[in-house]
Image: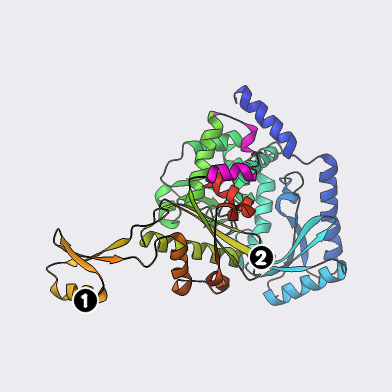
Amino acid sequence: MAPESMEKTLQNVLKKVTPGEKEREEVEGIAREAEVRIGELLPSGVKTMLTGSVKKGTFLAEEGDVDLFALFPHSYSKELMFEEVRGAVESAYPKAKMEIAYAEHPYVKFHLNGKKIDVVPAYLMVEGERIKSAVDRSQLHTRYVLEKMEEGQKGEVLLLKKFLKANGLYGAEIKTLGFSGYLCELLIIAYGDFEGVLKAASKWGNGKVALDLEAYYANEKELWARFPEQFIVVDPVDSERNVAAPVSAANFSRFINACRKFLMKPSEEFFFPKKMNAAGIGKWARGRNLYGIEFANEKIVDDVLWGQIRRVGAAFGDFLSANGFTMVGSHPYSDGKKTILLFEVKEKELPKEKEMRGPLSQMKEDCVKFRSKHKKAKFVEREGRLFAIEKRRWRDFSGAFREYAKKGFVPSHLGGIRKGKVLSGKGLIRYKEGLEEYIRYR
Protein backbone atom coordinates (compact mmCIF):
# COMPACT_ATOMS: atom_id res chain seq x y z
CA MET A 1 0.00 0.00 0.00
CA ALA A 2 1.36 3.40 -0.93
CA PRO A 3 2.10 5.90 1.84
CA GLU A 4 -0.78 8.32 2.34
CA SER A 5 1.16 11.24 0.88
CA MET A 6 1.91 9.30 -2.29
CA GLU A 7 -1.60 7.94 -2.53
CA LYS A 8 -3.08 11.43 -2.21
CA THR A 9 -0.62 12.85 -4.74
CA LEU A 10 -1.46 10.18 -7.30
CA GLN A 11 -5.19 10.59 -6.76
CA ASN A 12 -4.94 14.34 -7.36
CA VAL A 13 -2.82 13.88 -10.48
CA LEU A 14 -5.12 11.20 -11.87
CA LYS A 15 -8.11 13.55 -11.59
CA LYS A 16 -6.26 16.14 -13.67
CA VAL A 17 -4.94 13.83 -16.40
CA THR A 18 -8.02 11.63 -16.92
CA PRO A 19 -10.35 12.78 -19.74
CA GLY A 20 -13.84 13.62 -18.56
CA GLU A 21 -16.83 11.72 -19.87
CA LYS A 22 -17.74 14.52 -22.27
CA GLU A 23 -14.23 14.70 -23.73
CA ARG A 24 -14.00 10.93 -24.07
CA GLU A 25 -17.35 10.78 -25.89
CA GLU A 26 -16.28 13.59 -28.24
CA VAL A 27 -12.95 11.95 -29.10
CA GLU A 28 -14.51 8.54 -29.58
CA GLY A 29 -17.22 10.10 -31.74
CA ILE A 30 -14.65 11.82 -33.96
CA ALA A 31 -12.74 8.55 -34.27
CA ARG A 32 -15.83 6.54 -35.22
CA GLU A 33 -16.94 9.14 -37.75
CA ALA A 34 -13.51 9.14 -39.44
CA GLU A 35 -13.42 5.35 -39.48
CA VAL A 36 -16.84 5.06 -41.12
CA ARG A 37 -16.46 7.88 -43.67
CA ILE A 38 -12.99 6.89 -44.81
CA GLY A 39 -13.73 3.17 -44.63
CA GLU A 40 -16.66 3.55 -47.03
CA LEU A 41 -14.34 5.02 -49.65
CA LEU A 42 -11.63 2.37 -49.47
CA PRO A 43 -11.60 -0.58 -51.89
CA SER A 44 -13.53 -3.75 -51.14
CA GLY A 45 -11.54 -6.11 -48.93
CA VAL A 46 -9.75 -3.31 -47.07
CA LYS A 47 -10.58 -3.20 -43.37
CA THR A 48 -10.29 -0.23 -41.01
CA MET A 49 -9.14 -0.45 -37.41
CA LEU A 50 -8.78 2.18 -34.71
CA THR A 51 -5.53 1.69 -32.81
CA GLY A 52 -3.42 3.66 -30.35
CA SER A 53 -4.37 5.33 -27.09
CA VAL A 54 -7.91 6.34 -28.11
CA LYS A 55 -8.87 2.75 -28.88
CA LYS A 56 -7.14 1.47 -25.72
CA GLY A 57 -8.55 4.20 -23.47
CA THR A 58 -5.10 5.37 -22.43
CA PHE A 59 -5.05 8.93 -23.79
CA LEU A 60 -4.34 11.91 -21.55
CA ALA A 61 -6.88 14.70 -21.09
CA GLU A 62 -6.79 17.19 -23.99
CA GLU A 63 -4.47 14.93 -25.99
CA GLY A 64 -6.73 12.40 -27.72
CA ASP A 65 -5.22 12.09 -31.19
CA VAL A 66 -6.74 9.40 -33.41
CA ASP A 67 -4.83 6.58 -35.10
CA LEU A 68 -6.83 4.95 -37.88
CA PHE A 69 -5.32 2.05 -39.80
CA ALA A 70 -6.43 0.95 -43.24
CA LEU A 71 -5.57 -2.77 -43.44
CA PHE A 72 -4.92 -4.06 -46.94
CA PRO A 73 -4.53 -7.57 -48.36
CA HIS A 74 -0.90 -8.53 -49.02
CA SER A 75 -1.47 -8.31 -52.77
CA TYR A 76 -1.29 -4.49 -52.61
CA SER A 77 2.00 -2.65 -53.04
CA LYS A 78 2.94 -0.03 -50.44
CA GLU A 79 2.64 2.66 -53.11
CA LEU A 80 -0.87 1.62 -54.09
CA MET A 81 -1.98 1.37 -50.44
CA PHE A 82 -0.92 4.96 -49.84
CA GLU A 83 -2.66 6.24 -52.99
CA GLU A 84 -5.90 4.53 -51.94
CA VAL A 85 -5.70 6.02 -48.44
CA ARG A 86 -4.92 9.51 -49.72
CA GLY A 87 -7.79 9.35 -52.20
CA ALA A 88 -10.24 8.18 -49.54
CA VAL A 89 -9.25 10.95 -47.10
CA GLU A 90 -9.44 13.63 -49.81
CA SER A 91 -12.92 12.45 -50.82
CA ALA A 92 -14.20 12.08 -47.24
CA TYR A 93 -12.86 15.44 -46.06
CA PRO A 94 -12.27 17.65 -49.14
CA LYS A 95 -11.92 20.85 -47.07
CA ALA A 96 -9.43 19.44 -44.58
CA LYS A 97 -5.80 20.51 -44.79
CA MET A 98 -4.03 17.23 -45.49
CA GLU A 99 -0.38 16.57 -44.74
CA ILE A 100 1.79 13.69 -45.90
CA ALA A 101 3.96 12.23 -43.12
CA TYR A 102 6.37 9.32 -43.13
CA ALA A 103 7.02 6.31 -40.93
CA GLU A 104 8.42 3.31 -42.82
CA HIS A 105 6.18 4.47 -45.65
CA PRO A 106 3.94 7.53 -46.13
CA TYR A 107 0.63 8.12 -44.37
CA VAL A 108 -1.93 10.93 -44.18
CA LYS A 109 -2.48 13.45 -41.36
CA PHE A 110 -5.32 15.93 -41.02
CA HIS A 111 -7.36 17.64 -38.29
CA LEU A 112 -11.01 17.08 -37.51
CA ASN A 113 -12.80 19.18 -34.87
CA GLY A 114 -9.47 20.07 -33.27
CA LYS A 115 -8.15 16.50 -33.13
CA LYS A 116 -5.28 15.16 -35.20
CA ILE A 117 -6.17 12.13 -37.29
CA ASP A 118 -3.45 9.84 -38.64
CA VAL A 119 -4.62 7.48 -41.37
CA VAL A 120 -2.00 4.79 -41.87
CA PRO A 121 -1.94 2.12 -44.59
CA ALA A 122 -0.72 -1.29 -43.42
CA TYR A 123 -1.09 -4.96 -44.22
CA LEU A 124 -3.76 -7.00 -42.49
CA MET A 125 -1.95 -9.26 -40.01
CA VAL A 126 -2.68 -12.31 -37.92
CA GLU A 127 -0.50 -13.46 -35.02
CA GLY A 128 2.48 -15.52 -36.08
CA GLU A 129 2.49 -14.01 -39.58
CA ARG A 130 5.69 -12.28 -40.68
CA ILE A 131 5.29 -8.51 -40.89
CA LYS A 132 6.01 -6.73 -44.18
CA SER A 133 6.54 -3.28 -42.63
CA ALA A 134 7.08 -1.96 -39.08
CA VAL A 135 3.66 -0.27 -38.90
CA ASP A 136 1.93 -3.63 -39.35
CA ARG A 137 2.61 -4.43 -35.68
CA SER A 138 0.35 -1.64 -34.40
CA GLN A 139 -2.83 -3.64 -34.96
CA LEU A 140 -1.33 -6.54 -32.99
CA HIS A 141 -0.17 -4.20 -30.23
CA THR A 142 -3.69 -2.86 -29.82
CA ARG A 143 -5.20 -6.34 -29.60
CA TYR A 144 -2.57 -7.45 -27.08
CA VAL A 145 -3.09 -4.49 -24.74
CA LEU A 146 -6.89 -4.75 -24.89
CA GLU A 147 -6.62 -8.43 -24.01
CA LYS A 148 -4.05 -8.12 -21.22
CA MET A 149 -4.76 -4.78 -19.55
CA GLU A 150 -7.33 -4.54 -16.77
CA GLU A 151 -9.72 -1.60 -16.74
CA GLY A 152 -8.19 -0.17 -13.57
CA GLN A 153 -4.73 -0.15 -15.11
CA LYS A 154 -5.67 2.46 -17.72
CA GLY A 155 -5.37 5.21 -15.12
CA GLU A 156 -1.97 3.86 -14.11
CA VAL A 157 -0.83 4.23 -17.72
CA LEU A 158 -1.98 7.86 -17.66
CA LEU A 159 0.09 8.50 -14.54
CA LEU A 160 3.17 6.96 -16.14
CA LYS A 161 2.71 8.88 -19.39
CA LYS A 162 2.29 12.20 -17.58
CA PHE A 163 5.31 11.49 -15.35
CA LEU A 164 7.43 10.80 -18.43
CA LYS A 165 6.11 13.82 -20.36
CA ALA A 166 6.87 16.16 -17.46
CA ASN A 167 10.42 14.86 -17.32
CA GLY A 168 11.09 15.02 -21.08
CA LEU A 169 11.12 11.25 -21.44
CA TYR A 170 7.94 10.50 -23.39
CA GLY A 171 8.15 9.70 -27.09
CA ALA A 172 10.12 7.10 -29.03
CA GLU A 173 10.89 9.42 -31.95
CA ILE A 174 14.48 10.50 -32.63
CA LYS A 175 13.76 13.96 -31.21
CA THR A 176 13.19 12.51 -27.73
CA LEU A 177 14.68 8.96 -27.67
CA GLY A 178 12.29 8.08 -24.87
CA PHE A 179 9.38 5.82 -23.92
CA SER A 180 6.58 5.07 -26.38
CA GLY A 181 2.95 4.81 -25.29
CA TYR A 182 3.05 1.07 -25.99
CA LEU A 183 6.12 0.68 -23.76
CA CYS A 184 4.24 2.49 -20.97
CA GLU A 185 1.34 0.06 -21.33
CA LEU A 186 3.64 -2.97 -21.23
CA LEU A 187 5.39 -1.70 -18.10
CA ILE A 188 2.04 -1.27 -16.33
CA ILE A 189 0.91 -4.74 -17.42
CA ALA A 190 4.20 -6.18 -16.14
CA TYR A 191 4.40 -4.36 -12.78
CA GLY A 192 0.72 -3.85 -12.00
CA ASP A 193 0.54 -0.11 -11.47
CA PHE A 194 2.46 3.16 -11.57
CA GLU A 195 3.99 2.69 -8.14
CA GLY A 196 5.09 -0.83 -9.09
CA VAL A 197 6.90 0.47 -12.17
CA LEU A 198 8.70 3.16 -10.15
CA LYS A 199 9.71 0.74 -7.40
CA ALA A 200 11.09 -1.72 -9.95
CA ALA A 201 12.95 1.02 -11.84
CA SER A 202 14.42 2.47 -8.64
CA LYS A 203 16.29 -0.82 -8.17
CA TRP A 204 17.73 -0.89 -11.67
CA GLY A 205 21.43 -0.20 -11.73
CA ASN A 206 23.94 0.48 -14.48
CA GLY A 207 23.69 -3.03 -15.89
CA LYS A 208 21.19 -4.47 -18.34
CA VAL A 209 17.49 -4.68 -17.53
CA ALA A 210 15.25 -7.13 -19.35
CA LEU A 211 11.53 -7.83 -19.40
CA ASP A 212 10.04 -10.71 -21.40
CA LEU A 213 6.30 -10.82 -20.69
CA GLU A 214 5.60 -13.84 -22.89
CA ALA A 215 8.77 -15.74 -21.85
CA TYR A 216 10.04 -16.17 -25.40
CA TYR A 217 13.60 -16.58 -24.14
CA ALA A 218 14.74 -19.34 -21.79
CA ASN A 219 17.00 -17.10 -19.69
CA GLU A 220 18.67 -13.69 -19.50
CA LYS A 221 21.78 -14.92 -21.29
CA GLU A 222 19.70 -15.54 -24.40
CA LEU A 223 18.26 -12.02 -24.12
CA TRP A 224 21.69 -10.42 -23.71
CA ALA A 225 22.94 -12.34 -26.75
CA ARG A 226 19.96 -11.32 -28.90
CA PHE A 227 19.64 -7.61 -28.02
CA PRO A 228 22.52 -5.12 -27.74
CA GLU A 229 20.63 -2.45 -25.78
CA GLN A 230 20.89 -1.86 -22.04
CA PHE A 231 17.10 -1.67 -21.57
CA ILE A 232 15.22 -4.61 -23.10
CA VAL A 233 11.46 -5.13 -23.24
CA VAL A 234 10.65 -7.95 -25.66
CA ASP A 235 7.65 -7.15 -27.83
CA PRO A 236 4.93 -9.66 -26.86
CA VAL A 237 3.78 -9.84 -30.49
CA ASP A 238 7.27 -10.03 -32.04
CA SER A 239 10.01 -11.87 -30.16
CA GLU A 240 12.70 -10.35 -32.38
CA ARG A 241 11.91 -6.75 -31.41
CA ASN A 242 12.94 -4.70 -28.38
CA VAL A 243 10.18 -2.16 -27.62
CA ALA A 244 12.60 -0.20 -25.42
CA ALA A 245 15.31 0.07 -28.12
CA PRO A 246 14.65 3.81 -28.79
CA VAL A 247 15.31 4.75 -25.13
CA SER A 248 18.77 6.31 -24.99
CA ALA A 249 21.23 5.39 -22.24
CA ALA A 250 21.02 8.95 -20.89
CA ASN A 251 17.21 8.87 -20.76
CA PHE A 252 17.21 5.42 -19.18
CA SER A 253 19.43 6.76 -16.41
CA ARG A 254 17.32 9.90 -16.00
CA PHE A 255 14.18 7.79 -15.68
CA ILE A 256 15.72 5.72 -12.89
CA ASN A 257 16.81 8.87 -11.04
CA ALA A 258 13.38 10.49 -11.44
CA CYS A 259 11.71 7.34 -10.05
CA ARG A 260 14.00 7.32 -7.01
CA LYS A 261 13.42 11.01 -6.32
CA PHE A 262 9.64 10.68 -6.55
CA LEU A 263 9.56 7.67 -4.22
CA MET A 264 11.67 9.55 -1.68
CA LYS A 265 9.47 12.67 -1.79
CA PRO A 266 6.22 12.36 -3.79
CA SER A 267 5.02 15.64 -5.27
CA GLU A 268 2.71 16.81 -8.02
CA GLU A 269 5.64 18.82 -9.37
CA PHE A 270 6.96 15.58 -10.91
CA PHE A 271 3.85 15.69 -13.14
CA PHE A 272 3.30 19.45 -13.42
CA PRO A 273 6.72 21.15 -13.16
CA LYS A 274 6.77 24.87 -12.52
CA LYS A 275 7.62 26.94 -15.56
CA MET A 276 10.78 29.03 -15.38
CA ASN A 277 10.67 32.69 -16.38
CA ALA A 278 13.40 34.56 -18.21
CA ALA A 279 14.69 36.07 -14.96
CA GLY A 280 14.99 32.64 -13.36
CA ILE A 281 16.82 31.25 -16.38
CA GLY A 282 19.15 34.25 -16.43
CA LYS A 283 19.93 33.79 -12.74
CA TRP A 284 20.69 30.09 -13.29
CA ALA A 285 22.94 30.84 -16.27
CA ARG A 286 24.94 33.54 -14.48
CA GLY A 287 28.57 32.52 -14.19
CA ARG A 288 28.16 29.60 -16.62
CA ASN A 289 29.82 29.38 -20.00
CA LEU A 290 26.66 28.66 -21.96
CA TYR A 291 26.50 29.17 -25.72
CA GLY A 292 24.08 28.50 -28.55
CA ILE A 293 24.62 28.00 -32.26
CA GLU A 294 21.58 29.35 -34.10
CA PHE A 295 20.89 28.44 -37.73
CA ALA A 296 18.05 27.92 -40.18
CA ASN A 297 17.20 24.39 -41.27
CA GLU A 298 15.25 22.96 -44.17
CA LYS A 299 11.64 21.93 -43.63
CA ILE A 300 11.95 18.16 -43.62
CA VAL A 301 10.43 15.15 -41.85
CA ASP A 302 10.99 15.37 -38.10
CA ASP A 303 12.87 12.08 -37.77
CA VAL A 304 15.29 13.07 -40.54
CA LEU A 305 15.71 16.57 -39.11
CA TRP A 306 16.35 15.37 -35.57
CA GLY A 307 18.64 12.57 -36.70
CA GLN A 308 20.81 15.16 -38.45
CA ILE A 309 20.62 17.65 -35.56
CA ARG A 310 21.83 15.00 -33.14
CA ARG A 311 24.67 13.93 -35.44
CA VAL A 312 26.01 17.44 -35.99
CA GLY A 313 25.62 18.27 -32.29
CA ALA A 314 27.65 15.21 -31.32
CA ALA A 315 30.29 15.98 -33.97
CA PHE A 316 30.77 19.56 -32.79
CA GLY A 317 30.85 18.41 -29.17
CA ASP A 318 33.66 16.00 -30.09
CA PHE A 319 35.44 18.84 -31.89
CA LEU A 320 35.27 21.03 -28.78
CA SER A 321 36.63 18.23 -26.59
CA ALA A 322 39.41 17.42 -29.05
CA ASN A 323 40.50 21.06 -29.01
CA GLY A 324 40.78 21.50 -25.27
CA PHE A 325 37.30 22.37 -24.01
CA THR A 326 35.75 20.44 -21.13
CA MET A 327 32.13 19.65 -22.00
CA VAL A 328 29.62 20.21 -19.19
CA GLY A 329 26.49 19.50 -21.22
CA SER A 330 24.64 20.04 -24.48
CA HIS A 331 21.07 20.14 -25.74
CA PRO A 332 19.47 20.55 -29.19
CA TYR A 333 16.29 22.55 -29.71
CA SER A 334 14.30 23.38 -32.83
CA ASP A 335 11.05 25.20 -33.49
CA GLY A 336 10.89 23.67 -36.98
CA LYS A 337 12.30 26.75 -38.74
CA LYS A 338 15.38 27.48 -36.70
CA THR A 339 17.58 25.21 -34.66
CA ILE A 340 19.78 26.08 -31.72
CA LEU A 341 22.50 23.78 -30.40
CA LEU A 342 23.18 24.60 -26.75
CA PHE A 343 26.61 23.85 -25.29
CA GLU A 344 27.95 24.45 -21.81
CA VAL A 345 31.72 24.29 -21.41
CA LYS A 346 33.96 24.69 -18.39
CA GLU A 347 36.41 27.12 -19.99
CA LYS A 348 35.55 30.66 -21.11
CA GLU A 349 38.94 30.95 -22.72
CA LEU A 350 41.61 28.35 -23.52
CA PRO A 351 45.35 28.80 -22.79
CA LYS A 352 47.37 30.67 -25.42
CA GLU A 353 49.26 27.53 -26.32
CA LYS A 354 48.16 23.97 -27.01
CA GLU A 355 50.18 20.82 -26.56
CA MET A 356 49.96 17.88 -28.94
CA ARG A 357 51.15 14.42 -28.04
CA GLY A 358 53.58 12.92 -30.53
CA PRO A 359 55.27 9.55 -31.04
CA LEU A 360 57.79 7.85 -28.76
CA SER A 361 61.22 9.45 -29.08
CA GLN A 362 62.78 6.18 -30.22
CA MET A 363 60.49 6.08 -33.26
CA LYS A 364 62.80 8.25 -35.34
CA GLU A 365 60.90 8.15 -38.63
CA ASP A 366 57.57 9.00 -36.96
CA CYS A 367 59.23 11.85 -35.06
CA VAL A 368 60.50 13.34 -38.33
CA LYS A 369 56.95 13.24 -39.77
CA PHE A 370 55.53 14.75 -36.56
CA ARG A 371 58.02 17.64 -36.65
CA SER A 372 57.30 18.21 -40.33
CA LYS A 373 53.56 18.37 -39.65
CA HIS A 374 53.99 20.97 -36.88
CA LYS A 375 56.67 23.22 -38.40
CA LYS A 376 55.81 26.30 -36.32
CA ALA A 377 55.76 24.44 -33.01
CA LYS A 378 58.19 24.22 -30.14
CA PHE A 379 59.13 20.63 -29.30
CA VAL A 380 59.82 19.05 -25.93
CA GLU A 381 60.59 15.51 -24.88
CA ARG A 382 58.91 14.16 -21.79
CA GLU A 383 58.98 10.62 -20.41
CA GLY A 384 60.34 9.25 -23.66
CA ARG A 385 57.79 10.94 -25.91
CA LEU A 386 57.85 13.96 -28.23
CA PHE A 387 55.35 16.80 -27.73
CA ALA A 388 54.60 19.80 -29.96
CA ILE A 389 53.59 23.14 -28.43
CA GLU A 390 51.84 25.58 -30.75
CA LYS A 391 50.17 28.94 -30.40
CA ARG A 392 46.38 28.63 -30.74
CA ARG A 393 44.66 30.30 -33.69
CA TRP A 394 41.57 30.82 -31.52
CA ARG A 395 40.84 30.45 -27.80
CA ASP A 396 37.10 30.85 -27.29
CA PHE A 397 33.84 29.14 -28.26
CA SER A 398 33.15 31.51 -31.16
CA GLY A 399 36.56 30.78 -32.64
CA ALA A 400 35.97 27.06 -32.32
CA PHE A 401 32.67 27.36 -34.17
CA ARG A 402 34.14 29.52 -36.94
CA GLU A 403 36.75 26.85 -37.64
CA TYR A 404 34.23 24.01 -37.47
CA ALA A 405 31.82 25.82 -39.79
CA LYS A 406 34.52 26.00 -42.48
CA LYS A 407 35.41 22.32 -42.71
CA GLY A 408 33.62 20.32 -40.03
CA PHE A 409 30.99 17.63 -40.67
CA VAL A 410 27.58 19.05 -41.64
CA PRO A 411 24.63 16.79 -42.67
CA SER A 412 22.90 17.29 -46.00
CA HIS A 413 19.85 19.24 -44.75
CA LEU A 414 21.66 21.43 -42.22
CA GLY A 415 23.88 23.44 -44.54
CA GLY A 416 22.61 26.58 -42.79
CA ILE A 417 24.86 25.80 -39.85
CA ARG A 418 27.87 27.04 -41.82
CA LYS A 419 26.32 30.52 -41.64
CA GLY A 420 25.17 29.97 -38.07
CA LYS A 421 25.41 32.59 -35.32
CA VAL A 422 26.87 32.08 -31.84
CA LEU A 423 24.58 33.35 -29.08
CA SER A 424 25.33 33.86 -25.40
CA GLY A 425 23.92 35.76 -22.44
CA LYS A 426 20.72 37.68 -23.23
CA GLY A 427 20.86 36.53 -26.85
CA LEU A 428 19.92 33.04 -25.69
CA ILE A 429 16.85 34.05 -23.70
CA ARG A 430 14.54 34.12 -26.73
CA TYR A 431 15.03 30.34 -26.81
CA LYS A 432 13.54 30.09 -23.34
CA GLU A 433 11.88 26.73 -23.95
CA GLY A 434 15.11 25.14 -25.17
CA LEU A 435 17.06 26.57 -22.22
CA GLU A 436 14.43 25.33 -19.79
CA GLU A 437 14.67 21.86 -21.31
CA TYR A 438 18.45 21.90 -20.91
CA ILE A 439 18.24 23.04 -17.28
CA ARG A 440 15.54 20.52 -16.41
CA TYR A 441 16.69 17.49 -18.40
CA ARG A 442 20.48 17.61 -18.34
Residue 130 visible in this rendered orientation of the protein = no
Identify the residue position indicated by label 2 in the image: 337
Q: Nearer the viewer, residue 205 or 310?
A: 310
Instruction: Pick out the residue farthest to the top.
Output: 4
| Quarter of the image that includes the N terminus | top right
The vertical placement of 376 against 175, above or below, is below
Q: Nearer the viewer, residue 150 or 425?
A: 425
- Secondary element at image label 1: helix
The vertical placement of 397 against 53, above or below, is below
The vertical placement of 3 against 168, above or below, is above
> Badge 1: few (under 14), some or many (20 or more) residues near its Cα, within 10 Å?
few
Q: Point out residue 5 in the picture as x, y percentages from the top left corner.
A: 62, 24
In the image, 385: left or right of 57?
left
Q: Residue at x 85, y 60 (%)?
A: 36
Q: Which residues are magenta?
A: 265-285
In the image, 167: left or right of 371?
right
Type of amino acid at the residue the image marks with label 2: Lys
Task: Say if the magenta span includes residue 281.
Answer: yes
Type of amino acid at the residue the image marks with label 1: Lys
Identify the residue position indicated by label 1 in the image: 369
Q: Nearer the viewer, residue 327 or 151?
A: 327
Residue 14 visible in this rendered orientation of the protein = yes
Label pair 1/2, CB-CB below 8 angstroms: no
Which quadrant would residue 92 be assigned to in this image?
A: bottom right
User: Of marks 1 and 2, which one's residue comes earlier in the chain?
Assistant: 2
Task: Say if the magenta span includes residue 32.
Answer: no
- Secondary element at image label 2: loop
Q: Point out residue 243 in the picture as x, y percentages from the top left corner.
A: 56, 53
Q: Point out residue 367 in the picture as x, y percentages from the top left corner.
A: 18, 72
Q: Which mark is residue 296?
A: none
The Cα–Cα distance between marks 1 and 2, rounded to whole angstroms, is 47 Å
> Badge 2: few (under 14), some or many (20 or more) residues near its Cα, within 10 Å?
few
